[in-house]
Image (spheres, rainbow, N blue to C red):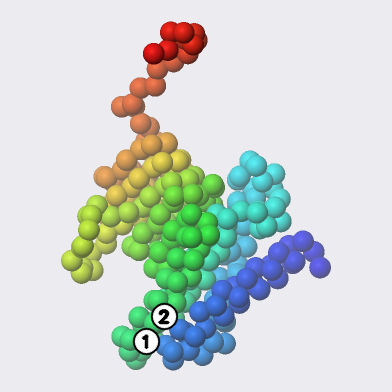
Amino acid sequence: MSDSGAIGSSIRSDINDLVLSVSGLVERANVAVPIALSRAQREAGAIIEDLAAMAARDPAAHDDQWYCYRSSLSFRALLTYRVAHAVHLLHGRSNRSGHEERLLDTAARLLSENAKVRTGVEIHPSAVIGRRMVIDHGWGTVIGEDARIGDDCYFLQNVVLGGRAIGIVPNTRERRHPSIGDRVVIAGGVYVFGAVTVGDDCRIDAGARITTDIPAGSRVRLRTVQQVLEPGKALVSVDRVS
């Protein structure tokens, strides 16, 4: 078997294991486990694309997919998200009861919460993420329930796609979280709040706070914080330290 075939086989096995880990909830929601497995397996192609994109775009990976598959917890977070999203979508049948839908939502959320504990990356199962997504480093990244992310995006660590409200929010069908276009690069420590849109081909540099729409092709840089270099100032003798 080729390396790509072996990786694909391993990913499909991982998908099955994740679905089976919540099979009790799935069955209580009146969904046959083989159907849940079949639906989740449809995500295998997208997961394989995520892995290839990470190997190609993460300089430390040296284009080694096996390295990323075996060692990257950020990739593991994406793999689990795609399975959790598939489980979440199982409640799309029109005659399914509200109780059954909540059981499926619980199963999906359980998968994402377990991934958060393991990887430090929190992705809500309802979020929609496009193809070839890369989350590099990842720790502290949060992608909210209503977030939408396009294709070929690249996020570094501690990226938050969240809502503006704090605390209890009234039940509403209005979108609360950001929409990110295609080919968007977001550096570390960037927070995007509210139902804003970041257009295609944008670059958001480290530390930015986004609360308004960003036009396609824009770059956002933080210029309000100054870091001062003072050569020689660290050379303080011990007897001068009070």
In the displayed orientation, state which residue is furthest to the left: 170
Residue 58 location (% of width, % of height): 61, 44
Specify whether 9 is left or right of 74: right
Tell me the residue at 36%/82% (across/down).
101
Q: Secondary structure at mark 1?
A: helix
Residue 93 location (% of width, % of height): 39, 86
Considering only vertical position in the picture, is 116 above or below 234? below
Query: Which residue, given by chain and number where applicable, does mark 2 sit on?
Result: 104
What separation in Å lies between label 1 and label 2 (alpha carbons)? 6 Å
Quadrant location of residue 2? bottom right
Tell me the residue at 56%/70% (across/down).
43
Residue 116 in view of the camera = yes
Q: Quadrant of the C terminus?
A: top left
Specify whether 194 is left or right of 216: left
Tell me the residue at 70%/71% (across/down).
9
Identify the amino acid type marked 2: Leu
Query: Which residue, given by chain and number where applicable, does mark 1 sit on?
Result: 100
Of 21 and 91, nearer the camera is: 21
Residue 94 in view of the camera = no
Of 218 and 143, nearer the camera is: 143
Considering only vertical position in the picture, is 147 above or below 107? above
Tag 1 near tag 2, CB within 8 Å = yes
Residue 211 location (% of width, % of height): 27, 45
